[in-house]
Image: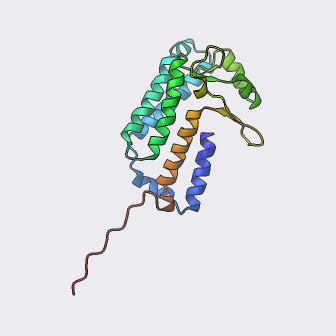
Amino acid sequence: MLFDALAVAVIVALIGGGRFSRFAQLDLRWPWVFVGAFGLRLAIRVLGIANWQPALASAPALHLLSYALLLAAMVANWRLWPMWIASVGVLMNVAVIAANGGAMPAAADLVRASGQLRLLALVEAGRFPTHSLMGPGTRLPFLADRLFLPPPYPRPCVFSLGDIFITLGVALLVVRGMGAFGWGRARPESAPPREA
């Protein structure tokens, strides 16, 4: 869902007069921390799928660490108001993940309906350690992956309430960063008064 939203944000920004070159004016702080946070989460999943036991054993702590890095980078960029929206979503996800042992609970029936049967099998086998399946003991279930974007959407997916805020914040950051609709553009300096 996030990558789809990013594609839409870029299209909207281009329609609104945005340019990729204006990203340089965004002055994003700690960009490598963002990359590291997402890279850590990807590594957990890849090593979990490979059934590497050390990764599976440390996955809950590393998963929460990835969110801690993400929050730290967001705080460092607090002057960019779309970060406020995204951070709400991150905090929602952190709350439900921490309450459920370091994994995001997901509704099995919705994952199945989305057609992600291999993912469902991996989660059931405990080899996709960033996620677990919802059950009677799931805590904060209203924050879990229990929302569904069904067909005819070309890429059906299951997501959380927090994911909505994260996606909206990141999409707005792209639009702002590209300077679309006049957002984030430096105002031209006023000309000095002419002498009489």
| Residue depicted at x 56% and y 41% | 167
Residue displayed at 66% across by 28% down:
146
Q: Is residue 192 above or below residue 123?
A: below
Residue 9 locus on image (x, y percent): 58, 51
Displayed quadrant of residue 125: top right
Q: Residue at x 51, y 23 (%)?
A: 63
Residue toward you, 32 or 102: 102
Left or right, residue 104 beside residue 21: right
**Foreground of the two, 96 or 63:** 96
Q: Quadrant of the N terminus?
A: top right
Residue 99, placed above or below residue 67: above
- Find residue 181 and report its horizontal and vertical position in percent: 51, 61
- Can you say whether 68 is above or below 138 in the image? below
Left or right of 39 on screen, residue 156: right
Quarter of the rendering occupied by the C terminus: bottom left
Q: Which residue is at the front of the view, 82 or 35?
A: 82
Q: Residue furthest bottom?
A: 196
The residue that appears at 62% across and 15% down in the rendered structure is 51
Can you name the residue that lies furthest to the left here?
196
The percent coordinates of residue 15 (x first, y second) are 59, 61
